Image: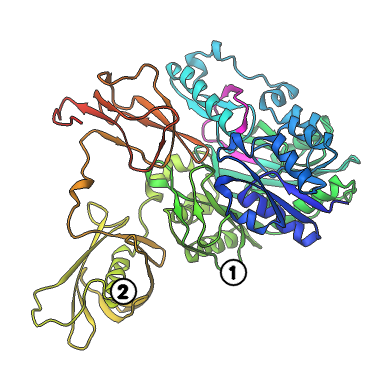
Amino acid sequence: MISRLLVANRGEIACRVFRTCRDLGVSTVAVYSDADAGALHVREADAAVRLPGAAPSETYLRGDLIVKAALAAGADAVHPGYGFLSENADFARAVTDAGLVWIGPPPAAIEAMASKTRAKELLGIAPLDPARVTESDLPVLVKAAAGGGGRGMRIVRELTELAGELESASAEAASAFGDGEVFVEPYVEDGRHVEVQLLCDAHGTVWALGTRDCSLQRRHQKVIEEAPAPGLPAALEASLLDTAVRAAKAVGYVGAGTVEFLVADGRAHFLEMNTRLQVEHPVTEEVYGVDLVALQLAVAEGAKLPPETPAPRGHAIEARLYAEDPARGWAPQTGALRLFDVPGGVRLDTGYASGDAIGVHYDPMIAKLTVHAPTRDGAVRKLARALERTRIHGPVTNRDLLVASLRHPEYARADRLDTGFYDRNLPALTTAPGGGDLAAVAAALAAARRGRFGGGWRNLRSQDETRTYGGTGGGPDGDHEVRYRPTRDGGYEVTAPEGVRVVAAAPDRVSLETAGVVSHFDVTAYEDGTVHVGGHRLTARPRFTDPRAQTAPGSLLAPMPGTVVRVADGLAVGDAVTAGQPLLWLEAMKMEHRVTAPASGTLTALHAAPGRQVEVGALLAVVQTEERPEAQS
């Protein structure tokens, strides 16, 4: 019997496993990097062991250190979580060689399936030879042989880009998984990403726990997942389940695993088998009424599964809440998560709590919100409303995008679920939700009540107070201008925007009437000028422009904090560059981000060098264009 379990992972993943351990009476051990010293998974564990360093390659990817940590903490079992070393056969062997119980499949099964190239070979599917790819093969997908989560993946549409993308994908895969092997396969445009959840015991029983649809993705990373996959023809669904079971039996699989497919034109194309628990496993748990982590532990202890797979019920949907800005290339965001509050009736899987900091070293996912309902329509409505009511004070997130996605006709009807959803719909989905002007009015009046902007009554009615807030959905510059004046009775009159009557105003709550409808706004302001009004995140603009904020035309500023991992070969000051040409690569939150020339011209400054840590807004380079010769630095 397992009595003390170490989770070889971090954040939401570790917290998820710990929750089941508490229910089972199993004590827990966390490992943590220096960057995670105060993280939620460390606080929730019964014991924790430090892994010196911050980068994954120094910490969570060091299997030798994790095994030593397990032994030092008196653990008798190791759960790899999902990601990092969860599909590393050598790590699994090191765990068992140390006399510890491995919560996962046999190393031989991991070797057969965890490498996507070997898995395809096992099923008779050969990848493309990069040296023989021709124009007729395009588009192709460069893909990491190990790991997942969209890291180490590149779509190539121009043959001249293949060599560079192979190098870039390999570097990213090596950083994320400790394995730089990549391969090339045909890229299927806009197919559905459908997967089958498996659970197998050591006695030959294989459960195929239905399907999941994970088609809504950005940068090859899943955003919204659901179970069961809607609208699959019965014959196709049966074929997917049968193929998944055959794959598991072919390698003597034991434990939880997932077989992934790309469905297009009524046909299923095998993608890979993930020899671990998936991030999106909660939707399957909700539909089948099981705890997959508890079952993993039972199987590892030698338990035999019942011969019959549990019966499904209803529909479940999960949304991944990321600290990122979808309107700006999905740029990851960092900073203090000042308030994080999710309404009741929602399953929450997270590695963060109010007051925690979101750093640059790891994936920007804050949490997963999952709901279950008798029908798909009910689950869609329930999750969208729950996200709307979730309070998130801190970095920019994808919350509004998730709400808009769930309510988009293509998703709501499930008539066009495919991986091209965001390519088609992102501009519309990132249009700001309504109410930004009223939120700005509420912010200004609450500030006046706090005494930030004065507010005493004046005889000169012409002297309005004017406040401007930055935010999406405002005027031409994305700003909301508010003008108001105090009244003799101690209230306020709003003169811009028009048609707004002040019902009540307090430092933290404002009620406004428009067109006969009264709306209430909870207002929270922070010292850095950020104001959260309901679901709106606004920034108070200064009255006067700070001249120090000016930058030279053509300046390339770091879009996020991170590390410069590469500079284009041979790039030097004085070189001629063309618009869109890759100049350097930043790594932030386990993903590489390419920084390109904003226009054609001459590189007049280059402040980036491999290994340099940069903050958001740091000057990386300057490109002087012919049209603007004054853009010297």
Assess disc 2: are there few (<14), some (14-19) or many (≥20) residues with their C-alpha within 10 Å of its C-alpha. Answer: many
Q: Nearer the viewer, residue 476 or 110?
A: 110
Q: Which mark is residue 446?
A: 2
Identify the residue at image location x=49%, y=47%: 359
Identify the residue at image location x=23%, y=33%: 554
Residue position marked by numbered label 1 in the rendering: 344
Placement of the C terminus among the 4 image quadrants: top left
From what the image shows, is residue 133 above or below residue 55?
above
> Which amino acid type is shown beneath numbered disc 2?
Ala
Q: Nearer the viewer, residue 253 or 449?
A: 449
From what the image shows, is residue 330 above or below residue 91?
below
One can see residue 289 in this view: no
Q: How many marks?
A: 2
Q: Residue 282 location, x and y as percent?
A: 67, 53
Where are the magenta residues, as a range? 177-194
Q: Is residue 526 left or right of residue 185?
A: left
